[in-house]
Image (tube, helix red, strand yellow):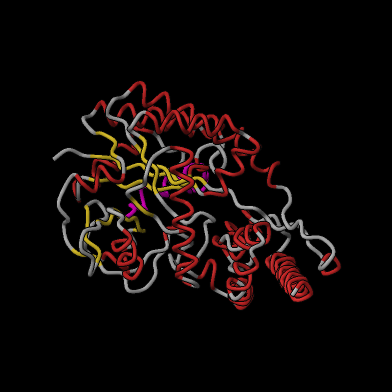
């Protein structure tokens, strides 16, 4: 049986809440700031060089295929501030060897708060992918790879053929992440689980000078992959696209490492599959059940990165509680603002974990502390509520 790397990368940028004061409530509703500057910075460091490298690999190696998921908020920002990135993505997808994976449009945790909103976001994302790339995704990943048995049942009923999850040891037990599986209770959908050790060697540890394997050579990493392939033929490497150039800077050698790894893996008889291609390549090895939610974040691999403290729970539940009146308002600007405020990044910035997990959260946060993130967000909640009251007053006055 041939050995395949299943390379899947996730592209996302949120709309970040500005330092919105309590004194701004009722006076201004421009909640977001700093996104253009950040997007253009990451575009220069990561998106353009990595997309160029992926195009080079596709042209050099017929055996090279991969999958991407791209949030709606990313596509909106790219269309506004870096349209050449959209063009580069379109060219890759047009080869027929780059798969787009479906997800929530606004990168939200809606599945755990409102199934109606969750479905609406998935459908909105599907429409956007069709509009931009003229393809219909057959595979699905939930925000932050948050997965459980209920999600698999939902995705199966929706019509997706493949779904992705973290391959966490506590769930898989003796089973290897290197096979196709069937989610418990489903009819047709297949499950691919992330090989988190080999994925995180690149995504998190590559530039860590305190890591005993630093600097990581291509030949050593190839040996690890080949050894792990003895546990199953699919090495599922799932990671953020920004791993290349943003999380791991160019001067670490990450781009050269990736190019040489692709070439040498193929030269040794391996290939690269899309998510759907891998899922269709074999019958499921067995059934996997995840009754409790598993994600690809933090050491616990659970939802505590977004739902681990009272600030996060309060903020998100308040915002989701406004869904019905916001949608009923018919105000497209208010509705879009509200949905941008559902993005999981907002809750992530409120996380109060310590040690290495806390360092990661602080790295991504634009705020001085989780408490600042919560305070600004709460002020925005108040303004959304104010806008709803004003909308209701106008309607009553007209009637």
Region of the chain picked out in magenta, as a range: 193-211
Task: Indicate the quadrant where residue 262 lies.
Answer: top left
Residue 205 on the magenta span: yes
Q: How many marks?
A: 0
Q: Is residue 399 left or right of residue 341?
A: right
Task: Tell which of 320 and 343 is nearer to you.
Answer: 320
Q: Position of residue 375 (x, y in %)?
A: 74, 69
Residue 329 on the magenta span: no
Task: Tell which of 387 and 52 is nearer to you.
Answer: 387
Q: Is residue 257 left or right of residue 39?
A: left
**Up-down: is 247 above or below 258?**
below
Q: Position of residue 394 (x, y in %)?
A: 77, 71
Q: Which quarter of the image is occupied by the N terminus?
A: top left
Q: Position of residue 374 (x, y in %)?
A: 69, 69
Q: Residue furthest top?
A: 60
Task: Indicate the quadrant where residue 332 lies.
Answer: bottom right
**Up-down: is 99 above or below 373?**
above
Task: Indicate the quadrant where residue 390 lies.
Answer: bottom right
Q: Which quarter of the image is occupied by the C terminus?
A: bottom right
The residue positioned 57% from the left and 60% from the top of the image is 343
The residue positioned 25% from the left and 64% from the top of the image is 183
Question: Could one spot residue 33 in this view of the protein?
Answer: yes
Q: Is residue 379 left or right of residue 49?
A: right
Question: Could one spot residue 375 in this view of the protein?
Answer: no
**Up-down: is 382 above or below 106?**
below
Q: Position of residue 307 (x, y in %)?
A: 54, 72
The residue positioned 20% from the left and 64% from the top of the image is 287
């Amino acid at each position: 049986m041939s050995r395949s790397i299943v390379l899947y990368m996730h592209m996302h940028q949120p709309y970040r809440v500005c330092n919105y004061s309590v004194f701004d409530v009722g006076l201004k509703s421009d909640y977001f700031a700093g996104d253009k500057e950040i997007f253009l910075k990451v575009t220069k460091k990561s998106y353009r060089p990595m997309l160029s490298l992926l195009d080079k690999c596709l042209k050099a190696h017929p055996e090279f295929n991969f999958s991407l998921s791209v949030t709606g908020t990313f596509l909106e920002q790219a269309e506004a501030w870096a349209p050449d990135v959209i063009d580069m993505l379109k060219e890759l997808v047009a080869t027929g060897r780059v798969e787009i994976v479906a997800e929530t449009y606004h990168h939200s945790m809606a599945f755990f708060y409102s199934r109606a909103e969750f479905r609406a976001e998935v459908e909105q994302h599907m429409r956007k992918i069709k509009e931009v790339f003229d393809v219909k995704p057959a595979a699905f990943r939930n925000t932050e790879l948050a997965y459980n048995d209920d999600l698999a049942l939902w995705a199966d009923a929706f019509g997706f053929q493949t779904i992705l999850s973290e391959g966490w040891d506590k769930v898989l037990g003796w089973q290897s992440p290197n096979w196709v599986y069937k989610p418990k209770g489903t009819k047709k959908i297949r499950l691919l689980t992330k090989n988190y050790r080999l994925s995180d060697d690149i995504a998190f540890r590559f530039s860590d000078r305190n890591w005993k394997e630093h600097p990581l050579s291509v030949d050593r990493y190839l040996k690890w992959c080949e050894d792990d392939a003895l546990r199953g033929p699919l090495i599922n490497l799932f990671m953020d696209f920004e791993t290349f150039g943003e999380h791991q800077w160019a001067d670490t050698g990450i781009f050269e490492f990736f190019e040489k790894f692709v070439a040498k893996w193929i030269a040794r008889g391996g290939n690269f599959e899309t998510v759907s291609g891998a899922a269709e390549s074999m019958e499921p090895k067995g059934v996997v059940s995840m009754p409790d939610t598993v994600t690809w974040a933090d050491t616990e691999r659970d939802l505590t990165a977004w739902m681990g403290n009272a600030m996060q729970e309060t903020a998100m539940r308040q915002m989701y509680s406004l869904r019905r009146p916001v949608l009923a308002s018919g105000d497209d600007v208010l509705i879009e603002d509200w949905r941008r405020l559902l993005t999981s990044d907002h809750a992530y910035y409120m996380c109060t974990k310590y040690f290495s997990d806390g360092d990661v959260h602080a790295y991504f946060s634009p705020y001085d502390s989780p408490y600042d993130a919560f305070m600004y967000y709460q002020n925005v909640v108040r303004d959304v509520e104010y806008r709803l009251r004003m909308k209701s007053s106008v309607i009553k006055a007209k009637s």
